[in-house]
Amino acid sequence: MNFWRIKLSLFINYFLFAMLLNSVGTVILQVQSTYHISESSAGVLEAFKDLSIAAMSFIMASYITKIGYKNAMLIALGLVTIACLGMPIMNAFWMTKVLFATVGISFALIKVSVYATIGLVTKSEGEHISLMNFIESFFMVGILTGYFIFSAFIDDSNLSSNNWTKVYYLLAGMAFTAFVLLYSTPIAEPQTAISTEPETGSFAEMLRLAIVPIVLVFVASAFIYVLIEQSIMSWLPTFNSKVLHLPATLSVQMASILAASTALGRFIAGLLLRKLPWLLVLSACIITAGVLVILALPLAQNLGTGPIKGWVDAPIVAFMFPLIGFLIAPIYPAINSIILSALPQKQHGMMSGLIVIFSALGGTTGSIITGHIFEAYGGQTAFYFSLLPMTLLVGLLFYFRQLQKKYTNDSVTFQTGGGGH
């Protein structure tokens, strides 16, 4: 196999879906003006995205090996090409729901396939965790790029305009280009990745895997992490606009600081986690993130009344709070890599499905809770909410490390009777 071309395709696919998935924060802000939608109503867009991810991931965790990783990714790219073309044509709030449902379904295909394919192009646990962090950091670069692309189509002088939907013509073109690149990239999937079991057997195997104690603790950790990340990422543009009183275009652009800091954090983590204990790094990151929340959010009070026209006029909190992305960045790819590295290749598809399912549920839960708190109590209170799941996550990671030590010495139990390496 040409590992370089495969890795390039994985990076580009993740880059594209980063822009599509995480445009939800920008779209939540825009639909409130364009379609006259309340905060709590706009917050359901996260559910259309994440619940479709969860549902499709549950199905694909069993069927993915029959379809093949490459075919699954091609289907996903084809679907989002069509959905993106439909967005500016239909120009309605219901179409944004259809779009995010389609993006969610497609991302489930992409993520399960990408996570499983990483095992085909890496040869050690260190290489696996490093590539996982680099791919996830590139995902954040995609988010960063998306903020600026979307902001270029926003008209601050006419917030009810639907001009911002024309960005989806560009995204459709990118999806089609990614389709062509992947189609022309050979991927030799091993025989172990082609299931001959009946689907019910695959579902049963996934359920057996899900009830292993270390997997239960892992999925709880993934759920809570994504709850934290998405509650901040999806609502940061609205926080910038309604709490910090930034113009809509600047609100979206400054949300890119979160993506940039997260990308940098994951890139550095890809280097540090090769040498330092992961529990030390991750627990220190979460504690420091909690301190940042406590220090930054009070700065959102008693802001000046002068007009804010650009980056130089923005309050310090608009720069400071998004740096939380740098601190929480290493957590998700690190714990994903740890759990996948402990499993044989044949179980990577099922485990990837569980990762995507519980990540999606965490994202939906975080966004909806934050939306309701935002509407009822304001943006500052909504973001203070993140301190609670941060505290829970620290405890879970310590327990996860204890179970990892146990199951490292008892690999037969960890593999749930599903076969050896």
Image: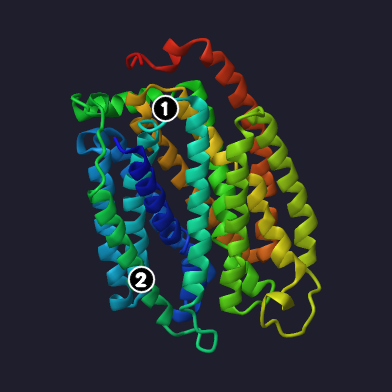
Tell me the quarter of the picture where residue 163 sits. Answer: bottom left
| Circle on res. 210 | 1
Choose mark 2 or mark 1, whichever is in front: 2
Percent position of residue 44, x then y = 45, 61
Does residue 227 appear to the left or right of 113 in the view shown? right
Does residue 329 appear anywhere in the picture? no
Percent position of residue 400, x then y = 59, 26
Label 1 Cα crowd, 10 Å radius (few <14 / some 14-19 / many 20+): some
Instruction: Say which residue label 2 marks.
Output: 170
Does residue 17 appear to the left or right of 198 in the view shown? right
Does residue 42 appear anywhere in the picture? yes
Tell me the quarter of the picture where residue 188 sits. Answer: top left
| Circle on res. 382 | none
Percent position of residue 405, x then y = 58, 16
Label 2 Cα crowd, 10 Å radius (few <14 / some 14-19 / many 20+): few
Q: What secondary structure is marked by label 2?
A: helix
Of the residues under marks 2 and 1, which one precedes in the sequence? 2
Total labels drawn: 2
Q: Amino acid at mark 1?
A: Ala
Q: Nearer the viewer, residue 420 or 296?
A: 420
Residue lying farthest to the bottom in this orientation: 157
Q: Amino acid at mark 2?
A: Leu
Residue at 33% from the left image edge and 17% from the top image edge: 418
Q: Work out which quarter of the rendered image holds the N terminus and state it.
A: top left
Question: In this rendering, is residue 304 above or below 399?
Answer: below
Question: In this rendering, is residue 225 above or below 21?
Answer: above
Question: In this rendering, is residue 380 above or below 357?
Answer: below
Tell me the quarter of the picture where residue 179 sits. Answer: bottom left
Q: Nearer the viewer, residue 108 or 78?
A: 78
Residue at 58% from the left image edge and 68% from the top image edge: 237
